[in-house]
Structure formats: C-alpha cells, structure tokens
Amino acid sequence: MIMLITMVTDAVMLANVEGNLASQVFELKEPPSHYAKPIVLTLKFDPEKIGPGKQAAVHYFDETNKVWNELGGQVNGSLITVRIEQMGKFAVLAVQNQMQAME
C-alpha cells in the first residue's frame, strides 16, 4: 500500500493550536487505489512540549470548521499511535490530562 505523506505549514491550521503543537503537521493523501481501513498511524512528537498536567493526543484537522478534533492515541516514549479511517491532516497536540481533570 502506498500513501502520499507531506509536511504542512498552513498558517490557519497552526493558529488554532494555541501553543500546544508537539509535532509537525502531516497530511496523508490517498492514492488512486483503495486501502484497508482502519490505518495505524504513528507520529513522533517532542515530549518536552507536553507541559505539566497535559498529555499527548493525535488530532485531525477539520477543513470545514477549521478546528482540530482529538483522536487520542497510545503513547510509547516519543511516539504516539492511533487508528484512523480517513485521510487528512494530523498532528500531536498537548491536551489536558484526563486523570488530573477528574481529581
């Protein structure tokens, strides 16, 4: 399976992350042939950009509403893995740690 992956520097998307960006923004484009779903996506991020009381989460950029939607993910060191079912723009953002939010 071949996918086209590019790095994105779109200012509109980057303005919406409010300093919480912990990785580059990547766009996955579907080739002409179909692929099996879901896709396992693993992104590298900078753990030092995840501040106190926060955790890393993969996000998908909603082109229509110009907002980032949290998908979550499983962290292993400086890598985070999530299953996705759509092509688009993805990044790792620092979000409020759910365990601390419940305390």
Image: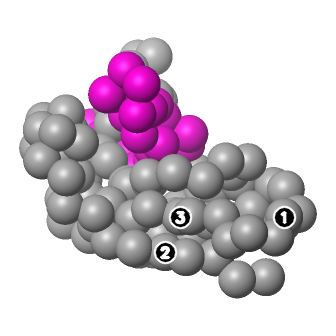
- What residue lies at 40% left-to-right and 34% top-to-bottom? 63
- What residue lies at 41% left-to-right and 40% top-to-bottom? 61
Query: Relative to residue 39, is residue 64 drawn left or right?
Result: left
Q: Specify which label sits upstream in the sequence, 3 or 2.
A: 2
Q: Assess whether mark 3 and mark 1 are in contact (beta carbons under 8 angstroms).
A: no
Q: Considering the numbered disc 1 on the image, is that residue within a helix, a strand or a loop?
A: loop
Residue 96 point in image, percent of width and height: 33, 31
Among the 4 quarters of the image, the one containing residue 7: bottom left
Q: Amino acid at mark 2?
A: Ile
- What residue lies at 44% left-to-right and 32% top-to-bottom? 62
Q: Residues within 10 Å of mark 1 (few under 14, many from 20)?
A: few
Report the front residue among 66 and 83: 66
Query: Relative to residue 51, is residue 80 drawn left or right?
Result: right
Q: Amino acid at mark 3?
A: Leu
Q: Assess whether mark 2 and mark 3 are in contact (beta carbons under 8 angstroms).
A: yes
Among the 4 quarters of the image, the one containing residue 101: top left
Residue picked out by circle 2:
5
Q: Identify the mark at residue 34; answer none if there is no mark.
A: 1
**Vertical comparison of 41 with 2: above or below:** above
Count of number-bearing discs: 3
Q: Amino acid at mark 1?
A: His
Look at the image and give the residue range highlighted in magenta: 53-72
Q: Residues within 10 Å of mark 2 (few under 14, many from 20)?
A: some
Distance from disc 1 to disc 3, alpha carbons, whole Å, reads: 14 Å
Q: Residues within 10 Å of mark 3 (few under 14, many from 20)?
A: some
Q: Specify which label sits upstream in the sequence, 1 or 3.
A: 3
Q: Is residue 40 magenta?
A: no
**Vertical comparison of 24 with 17: above or below:** below
Residue picked out by circle 3:
28
